[in-house]
Amino acid sequence: MVGTSIRTKLAVVAAAGMLALGTGVLAAGPAQASDYEILGCPSGFACIYTEGWNSTTVSQKWDRAGTYNLSNQENYHWVINNQTQNWKFKLCTGYGGTGTCESMPLDQWEWRNLTPVNSVIVSP
């Protein structure tokens, strides 16, 4: 912008900023988890639904920090992290929170094969 006035430069910067705000490029910060129950999974919980792609029945749910072993959770299930205050929910291949652990994002549904998952970790 050689030879361009300060006023023109400021107008270009302001326009770019407004465009970014309008398209959601400049976010206010990380999203918080929902304050609503989602198909039987209360706000503040992490939930696993019964087997099947169209299941809306929660088979297990957790809202307290800890490590929990799973049993009889095989094949594909819907899993949701409906916790609040950025709590974390991890699915682990070993019992007692060992092995490889994968974090579940807040407010995200995932269609997961739970056959290799043997425990979950809930933490603040």
Image: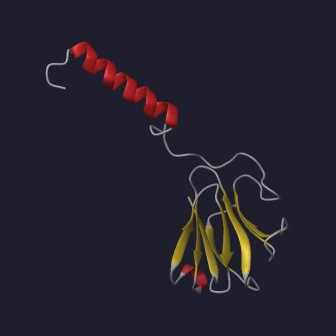
Residues 46 and 77: in front is 77
Vertical placement of 66 versus 14: above or below? below
User: Which x, y percent locates residue 14?
Assistant: 36, 22
Vertical placement of 100 versus 37: above or below? below
What residue sits 78% from the left and 72% below the top? 53
Vertical placement of 100 versus 44: above or below? below
What residue sits 63% from the left and 79% below the top? 119
What residue sits 78% from the left and 51% below the top? 37
Task: Pick the quarter of the image with the C terminus.
Answer: bottom right
- Left or right side of 77 for 18: left
Colour scheme shown: secondary structure
Task: Pick the quarter of the image with the N terminus.
Answer: top left
Residues 21 and 66: in front is 21
Residue positioned most to the left:
3
Q: Quadrant of residue 17?
A: top left
User: Which x, y percent locates residue 56?
Assistant: 84, 65
Q: Quadrant of residue 107?
A: bottom right
The mark total stands at: 0
Residues 39 and 118: in front is 39
What residue sits 60% from the left and 56% below the top? 106
Q: Quadrant of residue 122?
A: bottom right
